[in-house]
Amino acid sequence: MFYWPPPPFPQDDSLETVLKIFAEQGYERTDNWEIEAGFEKVAIYMDLKDMIPSHFAKSEGPLWKSKLGEGVDIVHTSLEVLEGDQVDEYGIVERVLKRPMRD
């Protein structure tokens, strides 16, 4: 049987749990939302109604990549592109994490 989040993490979808999972993978908080050479980044979008993480974007080369549903992947030049008119669906960027690129 598959559980999310995986044990030993708390069985909830809180920001704290998501941050613990990413920290386990070597990610740390950054205030720099721009793509940085030598680093992988993940942006965590927050649902403003439920105050839970609602979407993630990952840096890929000079762009951000997002999965918007089954079989729907997009690339975007900024994190803000999914905010604004899309706030009800994706929320706002709450946190950006980074770790050194892995081989």
Image (spheres, rainbow, N blue to C red):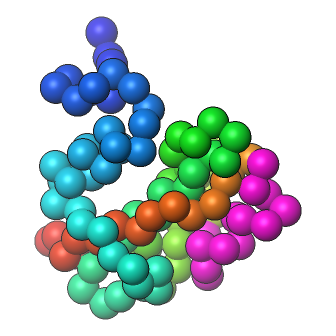
Residue at (20% x, 54% y) in the render: 23
Quarter the C terminus occupies:
bottom left
The spot of residue 85 in percent (x, y) is 84, 62
In the picture, residue 60 is in which quadrant?
bottom left
Q: Looking at the image, which residue sits at the far top?
A: 1
Pick the front one: 97 or 3: 97
Residue at (44% x, 32% y) in the render: 13
- Compared across the picture, whether 31 is left or right of 85 comes to left
Pick the front one: 96 or 50: 50
Quarter the N terminus occupies:
top left
Q: Is residue 78 above or below residue 56?
A: below
Q: Looking at the image, which residue sits at the far bottom?
A: 37
- Compared across the picture, whether 94 is left or right of 8 comes to right
Query: Is 16 colored magenta in this rendering?
Result: no
Residue at (24% x, 85% y) in the render: 38
Q: Looking at the image, which residue sits at the far right?
A: 85
The spot of residue 72 in percent (x, y) is 66, 49
- Compared across the picture, whether 46 is left or right of 89 comes to left
Asked whether residue 95 appears in the rendered view, the answer is yes
The spot of residue 84 in percent (x, y) is 79, 67
In the picture, residue 21 is in which quadrant?
top left
Residue at (16% x, 49% y) in the render: 24
Magenta part of the chain: 75-88
Pick the front one: 99 or 28: 28
Asked whether residue 40 appears in the rendered view, the answer is no
Q: Is residue 51 above or below residue 97?
A: above
- Compared across the picture, whether 6 is left or right of 32 comes to left
How many numbered callouts?
A: 0
Query: Is 76 colored magenta in this rendering?
Result: yes
